[in-house]
Amino acid sequence: MNWDGYEPYLPPYARPHAELTRGQARESYERLMEAAPERVEQLRKLLLCNGIELGDDDVAVQELNDWFRAGVESNPDNPERLRNLWYAVVNDVAMFLGGLVVSRNPNLHWALFTGGKRDVAFHKHVVMGFSKVANPKYNLDIDRIVATYAYQIIEGQDVDPEFFRRIMDMAAADA
């Protein structure tokens, strides 16, 4: 993996989202949304250094998925965790895929989820606005979804080789 020039995103608070106050969560969300174009640009540069061009069509999404599956690494000191830089890449991939979901489905939007402290998405950036589901709090916590996929890969689980494209399809079906 060529990391030449890659600059990871550093969130304003180094605590789990659920532990943040509402004001801290709002600040963290707004800062990430402001940084979204730069995060996608960092992902684009990282991919180019590794021979992949980031694009918004299904073929490019599949190429991103293939690159991600082939490259994601566990932490050598703690093989059950991701290598530290990969947490930043997971975030950048999630920002890209979430932005793509929103651009493809006009009724969807990014939001700070405040719908309940027991929800795993509490105080996180999620995609919302789904109209074909009964639950008005239904959301796509794409960062968690991409991270779970990364963990499945490093654990050697049998994963869907077209997972990122399936995210796009599932979101469109529920939009």
Image: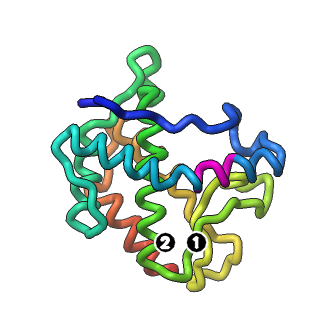
**Cα distance in 3D space between marks 1 and 2:** 6 Å
- Residue hosting label 2: 102
Q: Position of residue 101 (x, y in %)?
A: 45, 70
Quarter-of-image position of residue 54? bottom left
Tag 1 and tag 2, C-beta contact below 8 Å: yes
Q: Main secondary structure of the magenta part?
A: helix
Q: Position of residue 144 (x, y in %)?
A: 54, 50
Q: Residue at x 50, y 54 (%)?
A: 36
Using the rendered image of the protein, determine whether residue 146 is visible from the camera's viewpoint.
no
Which of 29/129 is in front? 29
Q: Residue at x 43, y 72 (%)?
A: 170
Compared with residue 81, is residue 62 higher up or lower down, i.e. above or below? below
Q: Is residue 141 left or right of residue 48?
A: right
Q: Residue at x 34, y 40 (%)?
A: 153
What colour-coding does the image apply? rainbow
Q: Position of residue 15 (x, y in %)?
A: 70, 34
- Residue hosting label 1: 109
Span colored in magenta: 28-33
Query: What's the amino acid at mark 1?
Result: His
